[in-house]
Image (spheres, grey):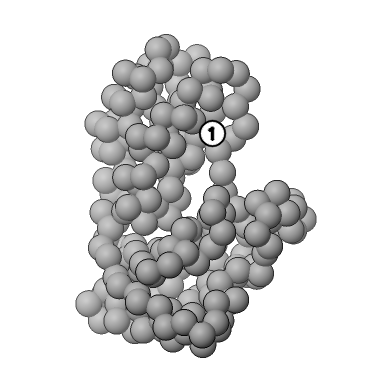
Amino acid sequence: MIENRIPHIYAEMTPNPLAMKFVADYALLPAGIQLEFMSAPAAADSPLALELFRMPFVKGVYIAANFVTVLKNDKASWNDVVFDVRDFIKQYIAGGGKVWNGTNSKDAAKTAAPESSVAERTVDHAIPANEKEQLIIDAIETYIKPAVESDGGLILFRSFLDGVVTLQLKGSCSGCPSSALTLKAGVEQLLKRVVPGITEVRQEL
């Protein structure tokens, strides 16, 4: 819980027209924790996300570091609702509302709920099986992830098989019309230069 502090929150557009990034002037989650919820029933671990899902146009919430990315449906315009969402997040945090029910332990967060739960409490790369997969993850962390996070999203390594790297996109990147172009024109070319043997990058569906 964050108490006795009035946050400064500003809204930032993302490449995804359905997603808006709301940035605070301090961390909302412990380092290394990212949360994504695509429905209200899945958001039991995040009181903030649950409250956001009460808004009829909200269809997804991604929280990481010092920002909240809200995905809306096509029945509302950001021009009409962006200030309402921003002011709600600001008032919620200023009033001491909890962002997350977890602990500061990333490992504890991963085991906070049964595997059958529809919620993703934390999201992270797949565990590397060899040195080349670790090189791919290192390249993502160093060169790609910061830019993706600046747009309110997250990119995760999932697998590397027969020259094909499979990645997962979350937050504002999920369903973004430009994500396929970004993968091919940006991420794929960079990973090919950094890690020998990569022939293609695909998005996990």
The reply to whether residue 63 is visible in this rendering is yes
Q: Which residue is mark 1?
A: 158
Q: Residues within 10 Å of mark 1 (few under 14, many from 20)?
A: some
Quadrant housing the N terminus:
bottom right
Please give the name of the residue rendered at 73% of the width and 54% of the height, measured from the top-left corner: 108
Residue type marked 1: Arg
204 displayed left or right of 20? right
Question: Front-most of 90 and 183?
Answer: 90
Q: Is residue 140 above or below residue 173?
A: above
Q: Is residue 60 above or below residue 161?
A: below
Please give the name of the residue rendered at 29% of the width and 70% of the height, measured from the top-left corner: 11
Extreme residue toward the right, this view: 114
Q: Is residue 126 above or below residue 9?
A: above
Position of residue 138 measured from the top left corner of the image (x, y, whole percent): 46, 30
Please give the name of the residue rendered at 39% of the width and 35% of the height, measured from the top-left corner: 142
Please give the name of the residue rendered at 36% of the width and 24% of the height, measured from the top-left corner: 191
